[in-house]
Image: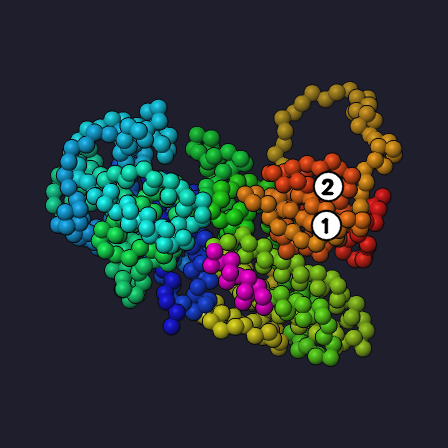
């Protein structure tokens, strides 16, 4: 019996409405939860809301309502968004739950009785936004070192958790468990933080300053620090939210997903609290990056905060889910732009997956009376066996490897490698031509079977990321897949699509027409001026002949580290092999371009991009973003052939 898979998101602060950052973490957790359910594991997926603390109290006061009413008003906005995004969380916790508060008070009492919480006077710099004290050496020019907002000096009596006692124990744990903090860059941040002496943590706030919180069980004049309250949710929820509550069965958590801004609280505060209570640590804490918008940090003052509700309403939940996890490596910062989202929808979803499904279903209806045919073993070719091998490798090898490392974008790159292979397969086998020759019927049936079977495997690969899309694909293919079952508990056997009755449906992803924002009107020059400008910008044949364009074959491809745009290619140009760095990584994954016959500028001076030498340039179409490579798909051309 496989061990349970327990995954959590942070519990989100209810001082404001949900944004793309909340959606990003929650959708990533949902993908992992859905994947592990397909594998047959018991899954508990927890998310929820952090409802105490000074920011919530201030937001409620600004709205002229009580804090509890403020929380009750905002809670449905998160819950409804998760429904719109098809988030399959098993538990939703609110820190105003009486049962959660009882666990927090029990832990506080336990630590106090053990002598690990003490009372002392403290003077320090306080950041209201982060709701934490900083020492003199931490503060930079009167500002918080985390959020860079102004801090104020406070002197008051508080209760402190003896966090300093657990510094070496935490360092030892990090040393013994390299995968405890991920990615590696975040682990290094925590190790750097722990190079300085770890101070004790203030875990109380006087009611005279903050009344909205959980009261200390040993001093009713104080409430607990919001992070002590919030972090306990990962354990407290297991006492009452699962269908069969059991901490022993579900703890330790398999993965805590967090944003990089709250890494310290999870990797240091939470872990030392658990150590003090003699509770095992979670297996992995993974801190992902932030989103910017069109290259700028999101903020209300800039007016560029992305409303996930609006994106889902305009483009659909699955397109939004796909974009967030395909666009950037999970763990790095990423940039959201409407143009990039539309580009992904049109190129990957409409022209790629949607096109493959549509043409396959149409051909089966036209050529096989709407029923997926059985293949003819005598009509099999290497194209068929290669397609089968690629589909099986994706489900049984590639996806498990990447998802185990939370490499969502690489998982989707590999999946769309199979989508592209499926479309190329149909192009090369040309079933519409086979249909005209009665003698080619065995080959036609074999081709259409393999196209449908590839889509069956793609249903399973797409489901964790795009559940509605997978279900619609299965419906059109007549597969009757029940995704609530452990469909991947045993290896998937090639051949399950045969005999299914296909049903033509709506396009999976209609193309989105990008509407350009009109530029402000400018004074127009006289009619003769544009002609003169055009003539000046033209080049002569001698200039064009200076550019040496050659056919090249892509031999290998890999991503340039720390870049989501650059691929490093090794290409054969006939006379030699060259290394070329191409800015095509948002459109193509490495597996998409290996084997392609492309066009390169062969006489360009070498240049370095992110420290990697490029000895040429590939030709591609597009303005701000690459829309497609210039390739030769239908002809076998020798590398080095001149393009003119």
* Residue at position x 45%, y 53% in the image: 28
Q: Main secondary structure of the magenta part?
A: helix
Q: Which residue is mark 2?
A: 616
Q: Nearer the viewer, residue 279 or 516?
A: 279
Q: Nearer the viewer, residue 500 or 103?
A: 103
Q: Is residue 365 magenta?
A: no
Q: Residue 203: percent from the left, percent from the top? A: 22, 41
Q: Nearer the viewer, residue 410 or 301?
A: 410
Relative to 177, residue 249 above or below: below
Label 1 packing within 10 angstroms: few (<14), some (14-19), many (20+): many
Numbered badge on residue 628: none
Relative to 193, residue 526 above or below: above
Label 2 packing within 10 angstroms: few (<14), some (14-19), many (20+): many
| Whether label 2 touches label 1, CB < 8 Å | yes
Q: Earlier in the sequence, mark 2 or mark 1?
A: 1
* Residue at position x 54%, y 67% in the image: 396
Q: Residue 313: percent from the left, percent from the top? A: 50, 48
Relative to 417, residue 191 above or below: above
Q: Quadrant of the N terminus?
A: bottom left
Q: Is residue 358 left or right of residue 5?
A: right
Query: What span is colored magenta in the figure?
Result: 392-405
Q: Is residue 472 left or right of residue 617?
A: left
Numbered badge on residue 571: 1
Q: Residue 249: percent from the left, percent from the top? A: 30, 65
Residue 185 visible in rendering = yes
Kindly give the residue lying farthest to the right in the view shown. Answer: 541
């Amino acid at each position: 019996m496989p061990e349970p898979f327990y995954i959590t998101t942070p519990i989100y602060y209810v001082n404001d409405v949900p944004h793309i950052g909340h959606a990003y973490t929650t959708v990533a957790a949902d993908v992992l939860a859905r994947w592990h359910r397909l594998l047959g594991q018991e899954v508990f997926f927890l998310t929820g809301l952090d409802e105490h603390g000074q920011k919530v109290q201030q937001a409620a006061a600004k709205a002229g309502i009580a804090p509890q009413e403020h929380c009750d008003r905002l809670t449905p906005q998160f819950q409804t968004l998760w429904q719109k995004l098809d988030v399959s969380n098993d538990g939703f916790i609110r820190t105003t739950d009486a049962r959660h508060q009882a666990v927090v008070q029990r832990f506080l009492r336990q630590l106090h009785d053990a002598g690990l919480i003490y009372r002392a006077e403290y003077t320090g710099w306080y950041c209201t936004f982060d709701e934490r004290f900083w020492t003199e050496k931490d503060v930079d020019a009167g500002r918080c070192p985390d959020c860079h907002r102004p801090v104020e000096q406070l002197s008051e009596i508080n209760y402190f958790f003896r966090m300093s006692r657990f510094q070496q124990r935490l360092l030892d744990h990090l040393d013994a468990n390299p995968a405890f903090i991920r990615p590696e860059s975040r682990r290094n941040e925590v190790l750097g933080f722990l190079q300085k002496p770890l101070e004790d943590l203030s875990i109380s706030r006087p009611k005279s300053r903050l009344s909205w919180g959980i009261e200390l069980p040993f001093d009713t004049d104080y409430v607990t620090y919001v992070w002590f309250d919030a972090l306990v949710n990962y354990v407290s929820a297991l006492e009452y939210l699962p269908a069969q509550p059991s901490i022993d069965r579900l703890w330790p958590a398999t993965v805590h997903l967090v944003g990089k801004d709250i890494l310290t609280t999870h990797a240091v505060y939470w872990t030392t609290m658990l150590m003090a209570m003699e509770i095992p640590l979670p297996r992995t804490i993974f801190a992902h990056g932030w989103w910017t918008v069109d290259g700028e940090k999101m903020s209300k003052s800039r007016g560029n905060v992305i409303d996930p509700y609006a994106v889902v309403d305009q483009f659909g939940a699955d397109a939004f889910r796909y974009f967030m996890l395909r666009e950037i490596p999970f763990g790095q910062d990423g940039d959201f732009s409407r143009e990039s989202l539309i580009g992904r929808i049109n190129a990957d979803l409409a022209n790629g997956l949607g096109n493959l499904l549509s043409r396959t279903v149409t051909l089966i209806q036209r050529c096989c009376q709407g029923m997926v045919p059985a293949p003819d073993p005598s009509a099999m070719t290497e194209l068929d066996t290669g397609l089968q091998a690629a589909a099986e490798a994706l489900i049984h090898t590639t996806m498990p490897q990447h998802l185990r490392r939370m490499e969502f974008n690489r998982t989707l790159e590999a999946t769309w490698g199979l989508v592209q292979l499926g479309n190329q397969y149909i192009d090369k086998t040309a079933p519409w031509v086979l249909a005209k020759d009665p003698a080619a019927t065995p080959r036609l049936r074999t081709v259409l079977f393999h196209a449908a079977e590839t889509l069956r495997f793609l249903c399973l690969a797409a489901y964790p990321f795009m559940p509605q899309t997978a279900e619609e694909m299965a419906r059109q293919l007549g597969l009757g897949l029940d995704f609530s079952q452990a469909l991947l508990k045993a290896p998937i056997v090639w051949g399950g699509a045969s005999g299914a009755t296909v049903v033509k449906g709506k396009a999976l992803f209609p193309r989105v027409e990008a509407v350009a924002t009109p530029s402000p009107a400018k004074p127009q020059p006289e009619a003769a001026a544009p002609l003169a400008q055009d003539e000046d910008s033209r080049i002569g044949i001698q200039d064009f002949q200076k550019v040496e364009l050659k056919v090249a074959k892509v031999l290998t491809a890999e991503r340039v580290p720390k870049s989501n745009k650059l691929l490093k290619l090794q290409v054969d140009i006939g006379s030699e092999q060259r290394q070329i760095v191409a800015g095509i990584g948002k459109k193509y994954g490495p597996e998409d371009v290996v084997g392609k016959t492309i066009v390169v500028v062969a006489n360009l001076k070498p240049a370095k991009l992110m420290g990697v030498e490029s000895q040429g340039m590939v030709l591609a179409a597009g303005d701000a973003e690459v829309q497609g490579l210039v390739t030769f798909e239908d002809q076998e051309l020798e590398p080095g052939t001149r393009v003119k």
